[in-house]
Amino acid sequence: MISIVIPTYKEAASIQEVIRRSGEALSQSGEEYELIVVDDNSGDGTAELAEKLSREFHVRVLRRTGRMGLATAVVDGWKLAQGDLLGVIDADLQHPPEILAALATALRQSKADLAVASRYIAGGGTSDWVFSRRVISSGATHMAASVLPLKLSAVSDPMSGMFVVRADAIAGVELTPLGYKILLEVIAKGRIEHAVEVPYQFEERTQGSSKLGPRQYAEYVAHLVHLAFVTGQFRAWLAYSLVGITGAVLDIGLIYLMAVRGGGSVFWTVPVAVEVALLWNFLWNQNATFAHRHGSGRAEADGASRLWRYQKVCLPGAILNIGLTLLLASQGVRLVLAAAIGVFFDGAVNLLFNVPSIWKIWGPKTSTSRNPLADK
Ligand code: GDD
Ligand code: MN
């Protein structure tokens, strides 16, 4: 059986159509289903309208006393659920309910633990979003990818609010999400080894209004910080940054020895120092930061291909570093200071932009199939 939670806050205009279309789509797919509306005391009749449909569809309503957040509504709904598949869909018709049937089928026909409705694979999309919303959305996605680089690399739309997970994968897991992003919580804490994605079009809202505001953005950041700690990502960042600091000291020291003391030209000493420090960082990351990720066998071949990928990912930062050091030095800045400034920006670029790609070098654990139904 599949249990779908529909979180609602003032969705009287659309709740009945969501229930109808979800119920019909799921029964047609041959899946036993239940719908659980979790309403936060909307006061506009949302809960009553949902209850009215309980004779026609398998739907019931959990009423909470006040607005307590989208993600916790989902968790509370799942606590009542009977299904071996647990899902969620918005109540405002921005998520086409018919996709629920595709998500259920995707899980029934595969061993995947999670099926995500995605805007970012072939066949998916969003209606025309304004530039600012696009920037916020991709910034938020990048932040999440930096906090959960391995787990999220397998899912193209980790912000999705429509997905279905096997109850087994989260049984016994304590879900304590904050704000909107229940999927992040599930991916971070659940036992997800394989995910599938199904494309969908995120529709424009035609009724009611979005409940996403400044408070939800703040909760999002707090939620990511919490996940950084519980998943061990914070410790991994720390190790990675410590390695980076030793590399920086090495870079500056080498430039001092070769150029300032040894009189070598900056045009070769600076690039050489940067590359030696890069190799040094790679070795420490390989043997310390990511030591627990080494697969068995083929260690050397893996090491070589990792080094190659590491070089490519780090190239922009290294070029910035070398360019900045040479530029500042040519303007009369003391070489050691110029090198320190260069290496600082190099590290900042890597930490801000490259965490997902650097973590990926040491291998994702979770795998994904894109759009499994289109393959058939
Ligand atoms: N029970 C309850 N409590 N429901 C809530 C609350 C709450 O505090 N806040 C929002 N909801 C319900 C809304 O009634 C709606 O059914 C659903 O959660 C999504 O809320 P919207 O306000 O419409 O969200 P959105 O359209 O801005 O964001 C959606 O799209 C994102 C992708 O861009 C959500 O689905 C996000 O989860 C999704 O990531
Ligand atoms: Mn919405």
Image: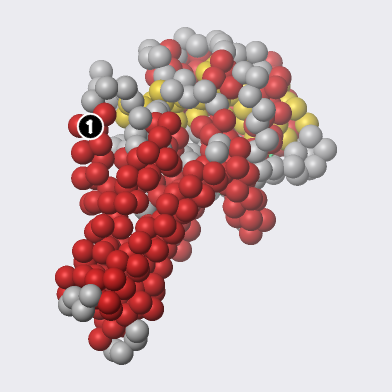
* Colouring rule applied to residues: secondary structure
Please name whichever residue, 208 or 196, is drawn nearer the observer in this view of the structure.
196
> On the image, numbered disc 1 is attached to which residue?
300
Instruction: Check the image and report above or below for 23 versus 45.
Output: above
Residue that sits furthest to the front in the current view: 261
- Which quadrant is the N terminus positioned in? top right
Q: Is residue 5 visible?
A: yes
Instruction: Check the image and report above or below for 345 versus 185.
Output: below
Where residue 281 appears, as percent x and y from the top left, is 34, 51
Please name whichever residue, 168 or 225, is drawn nearer the observer in this view of the structure.
225
Please name whichever residue, 50 or 328, is drawn nearer the observer in this view of the structure.
328
Is residue 137 left or right of 36 when viewed as pictured?
left
Q: How many marks?
A: 1
For image coordinates 21% across by 45% down, the residue present is 308
For image coordinates 65% across by 38% down, the residue present is 177
Please name whichever residue, 294 or 314, is drawn nearer the observer in this view of the structure.
294
Where residue 357 appears, as percent x and y from the top left, is 34, 46
Residue that sits furthest to the bottom in the current view: 332
- Which quadrant is the C terminus positioned in? top left
Determine which quarter of the picture holds residue 366: top left
